[in-house]
Image (cartoon, grey):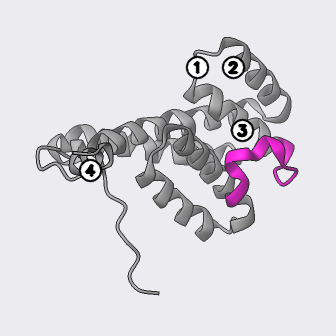
Amino acid sequence: MSETAQVTTALRSPGRIYLDKQSPAAYQALVKAADTVRTTATDAGLDRILVELVNLRVSQLNGCAYCLDVHTRAALRAGETTRRLGVLAAWRDTEVFTARERAALALAEATTHPTDALAQEQAYTEAREALSDDELSAVAWVAITINAFNRLSILSKHPVRGIPSR
């Protein structure tokens, strides 16, 4: 069996469980935490687009197809443009994101990959300059929360369903 066929078979494995369905109380606790983080972000003055940019960038780094699908649609509903979404993976090489958004994205990346101490310190310093204390905290919590959902969806292999005929 080819490697591609093995991966396809693994994706459809009947032995795969959805962790959220198997342990609904734990999943509901995560959802409740996400609701609290969403309120924290709103109270800190973060707009929905910035929150979705953080969700998307973290999901890109983690390779979570399910969360990328969910949060791309949420970003578009919030008014984000397809142009900015299209270059989000290379945000450092563009001029389409504000200093505040760039600081939030750098902090989200440092939260997702904390092993690079120098990059984390630089991202934190930039975030301190561009974000208020409440905003910085809210961005970090958004990144922490989406990281948890990414891991849940990746391990559960939550599907991204096809689009009905156009």
Discs 4/1, front: 4
Residue located at (62% from left, 45% from top): 54
Q: Dots 4 and 1: beta carbons under 8 Å?
A: no
Measure how far apart labels 3 and 2 are at the Cα level: 12 Å
* Element assignment for label 1: loop
Disc 4 element: helix
Q: Residues under labels 2 and 1: Cα distance?
A: 6 Å
The residue carrying pointer 1 sits among few (fewer than 14), some (14 to 19) or many (20 or more) residues within 10 Å by Cα, namely some
Q: Which residues are magenta?
A: 86-99
Q: Which mark is residue 29?
A: none
Task: State how far apart marks 4 and 3 are (Cα).
Answer: 39 Å
Q: Residues within 10 Å of mark 4 (few under 14, many from 20)?
A: few
Is the C-beta separation of discs 3 and 2 under 8 Å? no
> Which-is-in-front pick, marks 4 and 3?
4
Residue 120's image quarter? top right
C-alpha span from label 3 to label 1 = 15 Å
Q: Are marks 4 and 3 in contact (CB under 8 Å)?
A: no
Q: Which mark is residue 120?
A: 2
C-alpha gap between disc 4 and disc 1 = 34 Å
Discs 3/2, front: 2
Numbered badge on residue 114: 1
Q: Is residue 58 visible?
A: yes
> Is 155 above or below relative to 127?
below
**Residue flagged by tag 4: what amino acid is it?**
Ala
Asked if the residues shown at circle 2 and circle 1 are in contact, with their CB atoms under 8 angstroms apart, the answer is: yes
Q: Name the residue beneath numbered marker 3.
A: 104
